[in-house]
Image (spheres, grey):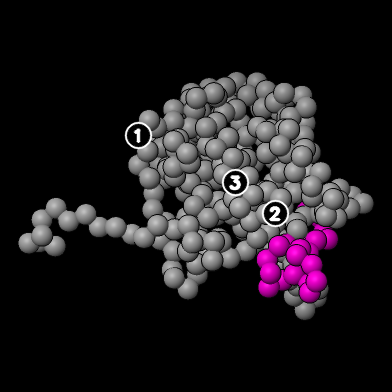
Amino acid sequence: YDLLASEARLTSLFAIAKGDLPTEHWFRLGRPIVEIGFQGALMSWSGSMFEYLMPPLVMKEPQGSILNQTSKLIIKRQIQYARSKNVPWGISEAAYNARDRELTYQYTNFGVPGLGLKRGLGQNTVIAPYATILAAQFSPREAVQNLQRLRSIGALGRHGFYDAVDFTPQRVPEGTDHAVVQNYMAHHSGMSIAAVADAIFEGRLRERFHSDPVIESAELLLQEKAPRDIPTATVRTEADERSKDETETESPDSRVILDPIKA
């Protein structure tokens, strides 16, 4: 939670606006950059949709800012990654198809390899419908199409979309390629409602949040521009944690020797 690409930035902005923290706190949040196409996006801990897209439910992300550019790029990357695995897109922290002795679904964070600093992200494929709904703030057309696909495989229940669909082979029943995690999370439903409201009413929740003079006084922090030069962050993955997809696409490490005598 010391990264700008996390829900911590909402806390930081609010505390600075109130005067509880100095402005320097915002710039203490980590800003590792990953290259997506020819642009740079902020890295998060787990590469999940929640870390990136929960704050803009109420926080503005000005055009041209590193935050706005990141949000758009990570949605693009999530879609690309899901397409490579032939599954619906939208990976975030969620319940998955494993239960404890009381038959309660287990819960953890999931994300896209390369977007997150956490190791082993390629070992699981868990798709969370609420992650797609969060993305509707930026890509409504793609989100609706993906939700229709999720609905076609049984992800829509009586009270809305279930929390997740697990495509991880080790946790899928024999004879099928996925397992619907049939539970609901109140906070995921709440974020979904807020995201739909922002998408339909053109960011009304953000407008209300920023209409407060206290928040308005700190808005300049959100204008931080995206870097032109991309200092890429390297995420090392232990060999025994690499998935097949990761090892096939990962390029080998290289070392440039400038002085052979000292090498």
- Spatial CA span between label 2 and label 1: 33 Å
Residue 191 appears left or right of 50: right
The structure residue drawn at horizontal position 39% and vertical position 32%, both measured from the top left corner, is 227
The structure residue drawn at horizontal position 37% and vertical position 38%, both measured from the top left corner, is 230
The structure residue drawn at horizontal position 69% and vertical position 40%, both measured from the top left corner, is 134
Q: Mark 2 touching mark 3, by CB under 8 A?
A: no
Q: Residue 138: image x %, image y %?
A: 65, 32
Label disc, if present, on residue 80 of the rendered structure = 3
89 relative to 21, above or below: below
The structure residue drawn at horizontal position 67% and vertical position 27%, both measured from the top left corner, is 206
Q: Which residue is mark 1?
A: 229
Q: Which residue is mark 2?
A: 87
Residue 36 vs residue 84, the one in the foreground: 84
Q: Residue 74: image x %, image y %?
A: 56, 42
Q: Secondary structure at mark 3?
A: helix
Which mark is in front, 2 or 1?
2
Q: Earlier in the sequence, mark 2 or mark 3?
A: 3
Residue 192 vs residue 180, the one in the foreground: 180
Q: Earlier in the sequence, mark 2 or mark 1?
A: 2
Boundaries of the magenta span: 166-186
Dominant SS of magenta comes to loop
The amino acid on which the numbered mark 2 sits, given as a three-letter code, is Val
Residue 226 appears left or right of 81: left
Residue 191 vs residue 114, the one in the foreground: 114
Q: Earlier in the sequence, mark 1 or mark 3?
A: 3
103 relative to 63, above or below: below
Which mark is in front, 1 or 3?
3
Q: Mark 2 touching mark 1, by CB under 8 A?
A: no
Number of numbered callouts drawn: 3
